[in-house]
Amino acid sequence: MSRFPESGLRRLRGVLAGHVESGRIPGLVALVGRGEEVHVETLGTMRHDGGPPMARDTIFRMASTSKPVSMAAAMILLDECRLRLDDPVDPWLPELADRRVLTRADGPLDDTVPARRPITVRDVLTSTFGLGMDLTALGTPIMNAVFEQGLTPNLPVEMPEPDEWMRRLGTLPLMYQPGERWQYHIGNDLLGVLVARVTGQSFEGFLRERLFDPLGMRDTGFDVPAGKIDRLPPLYAPDPASGEFHVWDPAEGGRHSTPPAFQGGGGGLVSTADDYHAYFRMLLNGGVHEGERILSRPAVELMTTNRLTPEQNAARDALAKDNVHVSFGQGQHGGWGLGMAVRTYRGDYAPVGQFGWDGGSGTSTYADPANGLVGILLCQVGMSVPDPARLVHDFWTTVYQTIER
């Protein structure tokens, strides 16, 4: 007997089709899996003005849904004792030694005090090393400096190669003391540099050898080869006022058409629904894929359960609950593991324990241990408008109604 009742799948298809028929979402790929049973929907077209239909193997920019996947590289190094959680990162990231910390997070860049202690591996993995993309602090001197230095993806300049990125990062003070406060994104990009320096390989090379190839993730990486570029739709950032579609990133000649200078663990991956399903199923299976162990069970448990103290989590709560006009309601999960959100209270239809994350390019990837469920929703509309967030919300609301046992 199917673990997804036919009536529930019809309902799911109808809800997704409504978003495509509205004209606000040109196309999408959705996947729901429980055990061996996998159901995939492909709706709409690659471009907003038509073009080829969406396909199961369409390649999407995963944006921040890169975070749960790229984190696995660090977990492999923890498993092998090549990294330790509470070791300082100075031996590998000397640019971050002897940090200065802003006296006030919104204060001038030269008003600082010494860091109380070195930055540790744990600080980087939990995004509490002291600097991040703080949407509650836009316009402050430190946030302006982060953007001006090209330390975040294409805002407003391309990110430089890793050593230069580290040099620039090392010129800035921290916003908060190491370990004090969760902050978004930059720690996930820093993780990629750390992995590359520890292993002596490129970040992508290590991911491919230890994660992508063993999991059969053939279409996952930081760029799309010429032979596959026709499977990558343009990424749209609609005008928030008019809703008019603007191409933020084309396929041909776009950001993923050539290997990037910086392989960003925070948001740089491209992938497919099936590749991501393989990864999240491995996590649900305690780190094992088709009999082969990829990660240890404790490593998976560390990633997928809350790692933050209430004090560290205050910033995440503020981002989710005080900025819903910016986040469109995304992010009210309660907890954060390593590289992903973890639900610690029931705020919507998903149960406590669900883990995963969403991406600003219109992507959502979660697994739910209580129901043995993986859900993946991928589209090509960025979060400059609320439409992709509403699509994601309706996807999950409807997915959970398909589960009857």
Image (cartoon, grey):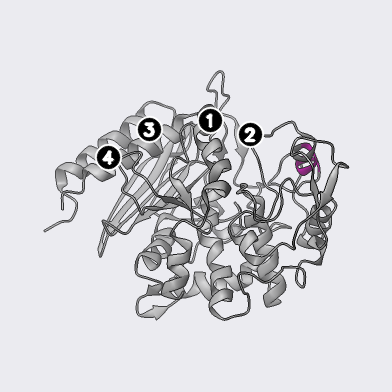
- Above or below: residue 160 compared with residue 358: below
Answer whether labels 1 and 2 touch (C-beta < 8 Å). Answer: yes
Q: Residue drawn at (37%, 45%), measured in percent from left and top?
A: 345
Q: Label 3 neighbourhood size at 10 Å, few (<14), some (14-19), many (20+)?
A: some
The answer for how far apart the CA atoms under marks 1 and 4 are is 26 Å
Residue tagged by mark 4? 398
Q: Which mark is nearer the camera, 1 or 4?
A: 1
* Res 190 visible: yes
Tell me the residue that label 2 is attached to. Answer: 136
Label drawn at residue 20: 3
Q: Earlier in the sequence, mark 3 or mark 1?
A: 3
Q: Are marks 4 and 2 in contact (CB under 8 Å)?
A: no
Q: At 60% across and 61% down in the image, what residue appears?
A: 125
> Please, what secondary structure does the residue beneath circle 1 have?
loop
Q: From mark 3 to mark 2, how far is it between C-alphas?
A: 32 Å
Say what amino acid the circle numbered 4 marks. Answer: Thr
Question: For the residues carrying marks 3 and 2, which lies nearer the camera in this image?
Answer: 2
